[in-house]
Image: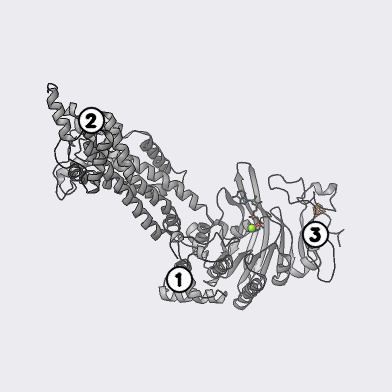
Amino acid sequence: MSVISFIVFFIMYKAGDPVELLLPPDATHQEVVQMRAYLGLDKPFTTQYAIFVKNALKGDIGNSYIYGQPAVDIVIERFPATLELSFLAMFFSVILGIPMGVIASVKPKAILSRSIMFFSLAGISIPVFWTGMVFVLICSVYLGILPSSGRGEVLYFTSAFTWDGIKHLIMPVITLTLFQLALIIRLTRTGMMEVLMQDYIKLAKAKGLPNRIVIYYHALKNTLIPVITVIGIQFGQLIAFTIVTETIFAWPGTGKLIIDSIQNLDRPVVVSYLLMVAFIFVIINFMVDVIYTFVDPRVRVK
Amino acid sequence: MSEMLRVENLKTYFDTRKGLVKAVDDISFTIEKGEILGIVGESGAGKSITGFSLINLIDSPGEIVAGRVLFDDRDLAHLSEDELSNIRGGEISMIFQDPQMSLNPVITIGKQLIETVIYHNPETSKQDAYKKSVDMLELVGLPAPEKRMASFPHQLSGGMKQRIVIAMALINSPKLLIADEPTTALDVTIQAQILYLMKKLTKEYESSLVLITHDIAVVAQMCDKIAVMYAGRIVEYGSNQDVLYNSKHPYTKGLIQCLPKLNEEKDRLFQIPGVMPSLLDLPEGCYFSDRCPYADEECKIYPETTTIEGRQVSCHKVNQIS
Ligand SMILES: Nc1ncnc2c1ncn2[C@@H]1O[C@H](COP(=O)(O)OP(=O)(O)OP(=O)(O)O)[C@@H](O)[C@H]1O
Ligand code: SF4
Ligand SMILES: [Mg+2]
C-alpha cells in the first residue's frame, strides 16, 4: 500500500498544477502563490511526500482541494453507492453464472448450451460503456421507462429498499453484471468439463447416484474451488469497472468521484480512493484464503 | 446352478477422430450364480471396457453399438439411465482399476460410503448407514475405520484407498461384482487376504464375480472360468482347468509360458515376441497372426469360434495344436 501511495503521489505531482484549475483564469499571480502555499504545493516533491506520509500515518491524508473536507471522508461517504453496485452485480453474476455454466457443460451440444455460450461470448466481447449507452438509449430515451442517471431515493445507504431506487439501480447493475456473468459462465463450464472427465465422477455414476447428485454435488464441489478464487479477484476488478458504469449513469459513487478528482487534479482524494481500493483488495484476498480453507480439504492445516 | 449374467455378441466401439476403435468386439460369455469369471489379457486388450460395458457406463465417444447384457431378464445394454442407476452400485457394482483417482478429493470417505448405502436403501437411517460403512471398512482390513470415515482421500495411502474402494463396492452386497485389477496397490499378503475375502463372499452369498487382471497366477487360484482377451476379442474361453492346463489357443499358451515356474530354473523368462497391435492398425485376418508361431496363409481370414473339448477357441489351427 505504501508503494501504491508513492506511485500515485508521484503521478499526480507530475500531472500538473491543481491551483491553475482551482482559481479563476483572471486570478493574480499573488493569489496563485498564496493558494499554492496554503495547499503546501510550493515545497519540493520530496518534502511534500514526507509531509504526506507523516500525516497519512496519523490517518490524515489531507483535505480535498475542491471540497475542503478531509479527502478520506469524501471517499468513505461515496463508497456505499459503489459497493452497492458491485455487490449486486457480483451477486447476480454468481447466482446466474454458475448454474448456466453447469448447464452448458453437461450437454455441450444442446441448443440451450450453445445459446448460453453465445451469450457469454457477447458479454465478454462487448465493451461495458457500449452496453451502458445502448441501455440508456433504449430504456430512457426511447421507452422512457427507466431513469438514466442518479441513485434515486436512498434508504439505509442503499437504493435497493425503495421502488424509485430500484428503478435507478436496474440499468447500472445489468450493465456491470454482463461481463462478470459471462466470465463466470465460461469459468464454470470449463471447470465442470474438466471435472466431469475424472475417474471419481465415473465412480459416482457406477455407485448408482442420480445424475443431479453427481453433477451438482460431486462435480460442482470440485469445480467451485478455482471459481471462488476468481470471483474474489473479479470483485476487485468490479470496483474498478464501476468507474465506467458510474460515469455513464451519473451514479454518485467513488467511480464518478475519482474521474472528477483526476480531472481536477485533486490529489488527496485520488490517493484516498486508491488506498481504499488497495485496502479492499487486501481484505478480499484474505477472505478468499479463509473460504478456500473451508471448501478445499487439501489446503486445510492438519 | 442358475445363470446370473449372459453377454451376447457385445460390441463397444469408440468413434474417435483417428478412426473407429473396436475396444470390445463381439464378445459372449455367461456367469452362473456363485461363479468367478476371470478376464485376462495384455494391456489395452479391452478388459476394462468390457467391465464398464457390463454396467453400460461408457464415456463418449464410446458406446455399446450391438449385443445384449442380460441380467435377471433385463438387457442392460438397452436400459434407461434411471433404471441403470438403480442397478449400478446396488445389484451390480464395480471396483475401478485406479483407486488413486476414483475417490472424490473434496468429500470425506464417510460421506462417500454413506451415500452409496442411502441411495440404494432410502429407508436406511444415517446412523445405520454409518455403522454399516464402518463395519465394511473393518471387513476389508482397514485400520482405525472410525477415524478414516472423517478423512479425505489425500490423507490416505494408496493401499488404504484401494480398500475403501473395495468396501464401497461390497457395501450393498451386490449380486455381481466386477473387480478391475482390484489389488494392484496392495502388497502381496494383503492382496491374498482381499482376494480370499472376495472369493469367500462370492461363494457364501451365491453372488458372482468378474475378476479382471493381467495376472494369470491370480486367475488360476481364483477363477472357475476364464476368458482370454486379445485386441478386443475373446480368443479362448472355458473352465479354469481347460484353459490353463490344456490351452488350445497359441496366445493362451504364450501367456502361460510367460509364467515363472518354481521347479524350473530358467535364465530368462519366455516372452511372446512383439506387442499387441494398435486397435486402429490391426493385422489382416487373425489379430494375433503377426506374433503367432503357427500363422500361415489360412490365418489371413479371421478364425471362426469353435467349441473343442469343452471350451471355445478362435484359431484355425486348434486341431493341430496339442
Ligand atoms: N476414451 C477412449 N477413446 C478411444 N479409445 C479408447 C478409449 N478408452 C479406451 N480405448 C481403447 O480401448 C482399448 C481397451 O482399453 P481397456 O482400458 O479396456 O484396456 P485394458 O485391457 O483394461 O488394459 P489395462 O490392462 O492397461 O487396463 C484400448 O486399446 C484403448 O485404445
Ligand atoms: S488363427 Fe492362425 S494366427 Fe491366429 S492364433 Fe490361430 S494359428 Fe495363430
Ligand atoms: Mg484396464
Are tags 3 and 1 found on a single chain?
A: yes
Q: Residue at x 60, y 45 (%)?
A: B15
Q: Chain of mark 1?
A: B
Task: Report the quarter where the N terminus of chain A lies.
Answer: top left
Instruction: Please say if A9 is above or below A200.
Output: above
Are tags 2 and 1 found on a single chain?
A: no
**Which residue is denoted by mark 2 in the rendering?**
A263
Q: Amino acid at mark 2?
A: Gln
Distance from Cα at disc 2 to Cα at disc 1: 69 Å
Q: Amino acid at mark 1?
A: Asn
Task: Report if residue B267 is visible in the image.
Answer: yes
Distance from Cα at disc 3 to Cα at disc 2: 85 Å
- Can you give x and y, in whole percent of width and height, for residue B121 in the image? 45, 71
Task: Report the quarter where the C terminus of chain A lies.
Answer: bottom left
Q: Residue at x 46, y 45 (%)?
A: A108
Instruction: Please say if B62 is above or below B138.
Output: above
